[in-house]
Amino acid sequence: MNAKTLYALIAAAFVALLAAWWINSSHAPVSESAERSKVLLPGLRERLNDISAITLTGADNQVLATFKHGSDGWSIEQKAGYPADVPKLREFLLKLADATVLETKTSNPKLYADLGVEDVKGKDAKGMLVSLDGLKEPVKLIVGNYNGGGGGGTFVRREGEAQTLLVKGNLAVEKTVGGWERHELTDIAANRIKQVTITNPDGKTLKVYKEQPGDANFKVADVPKGREVSSEFVANAVAATLSALRSDDVFAAKEMTPPDKVYKANYAAFDGLNVGLVAWVKDGKDYAQLTASLDQVAAAVHVSADQTRAQAEYEAALQANKKAAEDKPAADKAAADATAKPAPDVPKPLAVSDAAKDRDERLKALNDEVMALNKTFEGWTFVLPSFKFTNIDKTVDDMLKPLEPKKPEGKDAAKPGAPKPAAPKPAAPASGQP
């Protein structure tokens, strides 16, 4: 074989390999050749603010939740317009927008159920249909099982398409309405609270209080004579009820009304804030309705005390600066005067420089807080966590040491029905005596 023939054979083989590669690529699924490592929903991240509604549909074509975007933010249609958990909702949308295709999977409908991407019309469908409205082209995506192994990914399928895709990350959809609700109610620290008064359904009342904001622990009022509190900090949890208070679920107040007998609690802060609470138990759940108000007199007294304290602290700082300057040695003073800039004056707080403006700003902040709380509370009945409700279901007896049992008078006195000891017999008379 000469060189010319050899080169011709090599060229022919190369052409054959190239042709085979082209044929194989052209017949490969579009999703495999074009979508691998590409963004699942191109352009979604740039258009997130255009989304006006999100619908989650589960098995048997049942709508789990519909989120609507309005002037007050995101709300849940199935919860009478209660606010949605916006950070959680946004996190989910960002996951969708950033999801990239890891690889293509089956397009055989018989295998969809194994991946959780079967049509949600089925009664046993495991996936969730996510619909995004408000975009130029609405998005409808069936989100299936999360595959934790092999790098981690979620099986998805665009509604109306046969091809299943494995996309990067965990896109699992929360399947309870309560999981999408805004849960934060209040975060009023216990050190703001001056007094808590709780009235039980049976009429028993518990009152715990502090005399000064700086007191370490709350005291229990009206401790019965001869009884003691179980510990010096036993009442602190009662006053911490409004700290980091979250709801487990929520209902429209008109749909979940309180019964005749309820727990009533009032949390009065040193700065005049008052939060009232009505609570009850039904079907094993702890329900509550809340209101907020401002005691204007208490608020004014608190602001005045704060301003007096600010004035005293300012004057003390001035005296400290003056004393430090007087105590500095003369040589140091001369050196400092020659090289350093003059020390700045002690900054004058607004409570000192403009007491009227300071008072107005403080009172406005309190009134704004009351308005914000009532915006959260008004029109709703909340399901409280059980560990918070235990701080409402309290009486004075729960704060006290248990009574010690009475000690028996004799060895067998404690035994029921024990016979009384017989009276001693008189001694026999001595011989010769009558």
Image (cartoon, rainbow, N blue to C red):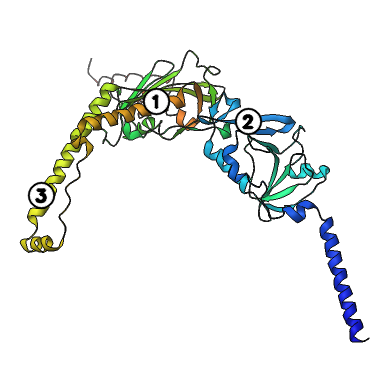
Label of residue 371 in the image? 1
Question: Helix, strand or loop at disc 3?
Answer: helix
- Of pointers 2 and 3, the one earlier in the residue sequence: 2
Tag 1: amino acid: Met
Q: Residues within 10 Å of mark 3 (few under 14, many from 20)?
A: few
Q: Residues within 10 Å of mark 1 (few under 14, many from 20)?
A: some
Give the side of residue 76 with respect to residue 224, left or right. Answer: right
- Of pointers 3 and 1, the one earlier in the residue sequence: 3
Q: CA distance from mark 1 to mark 2?
A: 29 Å
Front residue of 203/143: it is 143
Question: Helix, strand or loop at disc 2?
Answer: strand
Are the residues flagged by discs 3 and 1 in contact, CB closer than 8 Å?
no
Q: Residue at x 20, y 45 (%)?
A: 347
Quarter of the image where one finds residue 299: top left
* Residue identifier under label 2: 65
Q: CA distance from mark 2 to mark 3?
A: 66 Å
Tag 2: amino acid: Ala
Tag 3: amino acid: Lys
- Which residue occupies the extreme front position in the image? 4
Q: In the image, residue 398 lies at what x, y percent?
A: 39, 27
Residue 401 vs 101, above or below: the answer is above
* Residue identifier under label 3: 322
Question: Helix, strand or loop at disc 1?
Answer: helix
- Which residue occupies the extreme left position in the image? 330
Q: In the image, residue 327 lies at what x, y percent?
A: 8, 55
- Which residue occupies the extreme right position in the image? 1
Give the side of residue 151 with respect to residue 21, left or right. Answer: left
Residue 199 vs 11, above or below: the answer is above
Are the residues flagged by discs 2 and 3 in contact, CB closer than 8 Å?
no
